[in-house]
């Protein structure tokens, strides 16, 4: 029986421009793997411990080094071919056929959409091919990688820094590097990346680097762990992080040419967080091909993998449980054949040979959540029953720790006949919706990007067109993989990046958000409030105005609210659009009327939320309120002794009452929702104490180098309309009582 023989690699020493630690940990031996369950085999046996060197570097310093010390490397090396010793699957496909229609499939309710598109890294910037585009995202940043470059941006697509891969992963001068992938580990709140570097073309000194950030800021400090593989090239690396360990996979080639097997390097988070040299357990299986880790969405300790088995001709899964220092391996058979080779290169306009080295049928990526393992690969499929096209096979396995995996879904997407679908990427949202994106081309259509979604409670959604090309690809190498990343800011979304083509035939990438949101956003009824620190206009002739702030709240866990439609009903004219806004507040100038006036000066608001999936929620309507001005001379005011009247055309009603007597008070009482004290600020004014319904609210300073008339010095808003008393007490200097503004 073949087994994943495990050796322990000391985790690469963290390389640092800031500090370098060099402590080699003792060698440890991995335990013998336990059988997985019914129908499983213990293919991964014992292992050795490998050591790695740890180094520290700042993301910002790496970006500076990229700009100030440019380096030409041999990034962009092609992935090595499938070994001849790995059995191929049977001819044809047993998967269910699905037609790739040319427009989004009509579904009941909200559908799959692509949003927030922005331009990513391109060939002109990097200078290499293939790109191997990848993306990761957290609540603040997007990190995109291609061969040769790491780009950090905001979620809106604003570039913050571009960092050479050699700089971030601390690759020594004179070496080439390739296959960078970075993921966001939401459980630990850190970025985790993998990359290989090598002395091309001899491949006598090869390394795999795992890089881990100190926190959520990708431009902050990182620790890189450098594993030396000697004359064995760890090609096509994969990366996954669980709650207690990180695993990195590779296809290993001695001297860069002789296939040795597919391997996994497992390391504990407890050691990683120390930031110093550490050890990791290395396991390899000579009959395994292309071990792909299932990137975890959610929280789990066990890690699931899928690979092609050379001894059975069928796929297998691997589950790693236990600690990162003493992992246990359980292997199980999957009733799906290995890949069986591709009949043709993807067709494109003006190219009889097709797109060069676009896909070899391997599984490029996998994701896992709640006992569902999803992956996709390119397969031949005869959509017309005769001629083979390239199609994308999408597979979902139901995993278990006690029984063999069950094939829950095995379906082919592509077509029509004459169209090739290839280079799939797979991702999963926080709610368990699987997303798959791939390239599509034909003799008459250049490469485009398409996407589908498989929500847990509905059938397949899509396909939709995500990106298009401006021409045919003239390069010598298409990308080996494409990335889809879970979005922590939306339970029904992922971010994707893929390769398309410019008009001059070079590659480019685009980044966008894929959304399948079946829930509707909600919003609370808009509330109106007077604003402290603003001024009302003078009531000489109607209309006069007062600034009013309108606020509400909204929620949409699926994809987030992207906009609100705010309508206003002013003066009884009916609702009309006031604004389309992304914020949950709005300031408007409301006309106000004097107390006792019969003029209709009422205002009311209604808000409708829309989420990023295009769903509009139920409208929420606020109260109908009328801004009403009460002059200081009305019966709503009562005064103690010590107040005097003064006239000035700049006062709201042409006059005020004022007092400089400490302790003199004025009380205002009426029914309303929002109350605003209107006064004068100037260099000759003093301070006033404010009480509301007998409760002291604070002392307000009215002294200012700039004179302001009809100034709202204090405002308070209640949740409902009721009668309230506001009492003003002179604390020092002169205090003017001009008016009170009330929303009622």
Image (cartoon, rainbow, N blue to C red):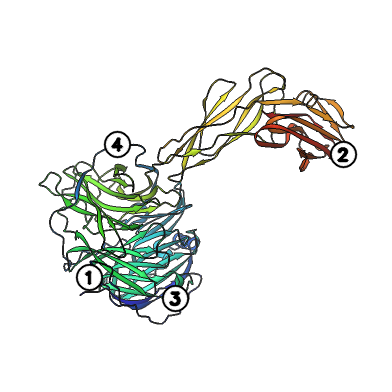
Residue 203 visible at all: no
Q: Quadrant of residue 234?
A: bottom left
The image's mark for residue 106 is 4
**Marking on residue 257:** 1
- The CA span between labels 3 and 2 is 72 Å
How packed mark 4 is, by other alpha carbons closer than 10 Å (few <14, some 14-19, many 20 or more), is few
Secondary structure beneath label 1: loop
Picture disc at residue 534 = none
Query: Which callout, 3 or 2, points at the residue further toward the start of the chain?
Result: 3
x, y percentage for residue 487?
42, 51
Q: Nearer the viewer, mark 4 or mark 3?
A: 4
Earlier residue among tags 2 and 1: 1
Task: Give the mark nearer the N terminus: 4 vs 1.
Answer: 4
Residue 381 sits above or below residue 604 on the image: below
Looking at marks 4 and 2 on the same chain, the residue that comes earlier in the sequence is marked by 4
| Residue under label 3 | 277
Q: Is residue 638 above or below residue 230?
A: above
Query: How crowded is the residue under tag 3: few (<14 C-alpha within 10 Å), some, or many (20+)?
Result: many
- Position of the C terminus, as image quadrant, is top right
**Badge 2 element:** loop
Earlier-in-chain disc, 3 versus 1: 1
Cβ atoms at labels 3 and 1 below 8 Å apart? no
């Amino acid at each position: 029986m073949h087994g994943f023989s495990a050796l322990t690699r000391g985790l690469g020493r963290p390389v640092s421009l800031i500090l370098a630690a060099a402590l080699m940990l003792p060698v440890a031996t991995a335990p013998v793997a336990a059988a997985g369950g019914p129908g499983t085999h213990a293919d991964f046996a014992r292992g050795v411990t490998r050591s790695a060197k740890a180094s520290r570097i700042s993301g910002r310093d790496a970006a500076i080094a990229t700009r100030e010390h440019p380096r030409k490397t041999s990034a962009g090396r092609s992935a090595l071919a499938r070994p001849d010793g790995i059995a191929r699957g049977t001819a044809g496909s047993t998967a269910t056929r699905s037609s790739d229609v040319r427009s989004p499939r009509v579904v009941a309710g909200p559908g799959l959409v692509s949003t927030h598109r922005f331009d990513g890294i391109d060939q002109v910037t990097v200078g290499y091919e293939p790109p191997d585009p990848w993306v990761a995202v957290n609540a603040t940043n997007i990190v995109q990688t291609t061969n040769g470059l790491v780009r950090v941006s905001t979620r809106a697509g604003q570039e913050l820094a571009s960092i050479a891969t050699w700089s971030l992963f601390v690759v020594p001068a004179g070496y080439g590097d390739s296959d960078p992938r970075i993921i966001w580990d939401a459980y630990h709140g850190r970025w985790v990346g993998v990359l290989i570097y090598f002395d091309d073309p001899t491949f006598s000194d090869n390394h795999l680097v795992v890089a881990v950030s100190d926190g959520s800021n990708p431009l902050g400090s990182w620790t890189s762990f450098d594993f030396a593989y000697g004359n064995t090239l760890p090609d096509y690396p994969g990366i996954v992080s669980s709650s207690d360990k990180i695993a990195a996979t590779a296809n290993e080639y001695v001297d860069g040419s002789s296939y040795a097997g597919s391997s996994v390097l497992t390391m504990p988070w407890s050691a990683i967080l120390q930031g110093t040299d550490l050890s990791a357990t290395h396991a390899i299986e000579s009959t395994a091909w292309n071990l792909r880790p299932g990137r975890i969405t959610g929280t789990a300790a066990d890690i699931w993998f899928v690979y092609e088995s050379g001894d059975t001709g069928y796929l297998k899964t691997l589950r790693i449980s236990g600690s990162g220092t003493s992992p246990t391996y359980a292997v199980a058979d999957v009733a799906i054949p290995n890949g069986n080779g591709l009949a043709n290169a993807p067709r494109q306009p003006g190219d009889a040979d097709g797109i060069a080295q676009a896909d070899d049928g391997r599984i490029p990526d996998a994701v896992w959540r709640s006992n569902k393992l999803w992956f996709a690969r390119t397969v031949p499929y005869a959509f017309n029953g005769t001629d083979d096209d390239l199609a994308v096979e999408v597979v979902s396995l139901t995993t278990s720790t006690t029984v063999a995996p069950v094939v829950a879904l095995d379906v082919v997407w592509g077509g029509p006949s004459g169209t090739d679908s290839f280079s799939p990427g797979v991702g999963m949202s926080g709610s368990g919706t699987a997303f798959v994106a791939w390239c599509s081309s034909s003799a008459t259509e250049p490469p485009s990007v398409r996407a589908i979604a498989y929500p847990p409670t509905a059938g397949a959604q899509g396909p939709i067109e995500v990106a298009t090309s401006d021409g045919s690809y003239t390069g010598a190498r298409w990308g080996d993989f494409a990335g889809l990343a879970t979005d922590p800011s939306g339970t029904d979304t992922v971010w994707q990046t893929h390769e398309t083509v410019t008009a001059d035939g070079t590659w480019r990438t685009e980044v966008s958000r894929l959304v399948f949101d079946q829930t509707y956003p909600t919003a609370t009824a808009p509330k109106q409030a007077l604003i402290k620190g603003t001024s009302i206009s003078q009531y000489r002739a109607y209309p006069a105005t007062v600034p009013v702030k309108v606020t509400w709240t909204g929620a949409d866990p699926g994809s987030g609210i992207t906009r609100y439609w705010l309508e206003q009903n002013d003066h009884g004219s009916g609702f009309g659009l006031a604004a389309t806004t992304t914020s949950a507040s709005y300031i408007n100038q409301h006309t106000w009327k004097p107390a006792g006036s019969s003029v209709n000066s009422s205002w009311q608001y209604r808000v409708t939320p829309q989420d990023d999936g295009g769903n509009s929620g139920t409208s929420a309507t606020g109260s109908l309120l009328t801004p009403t001005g009460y002059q200081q001379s009305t019966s709503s005011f009562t005064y103690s002794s010590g107040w005097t009247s003064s006239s000035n055309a700049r006062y709201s009603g042409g006059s005020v009452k004022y007092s400089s007597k400490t302790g003199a008070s004025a009380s205002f009482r009426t029914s309303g929702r929002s109350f605003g004290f209107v006064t004068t600020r100037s260099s000759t004014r003093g301070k006033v104490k404010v009480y509301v319904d007998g409760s002291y609210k604070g002392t307000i300073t009215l002294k200012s180098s700039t004179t302001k008339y009809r100034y709202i010095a204090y405002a308070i808003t209640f949740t409902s309309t009721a009668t309230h008393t506001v009492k003003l007490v002179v604390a020092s200097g002169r205090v003017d009582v001009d008016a009170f503004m009330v929303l009622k």
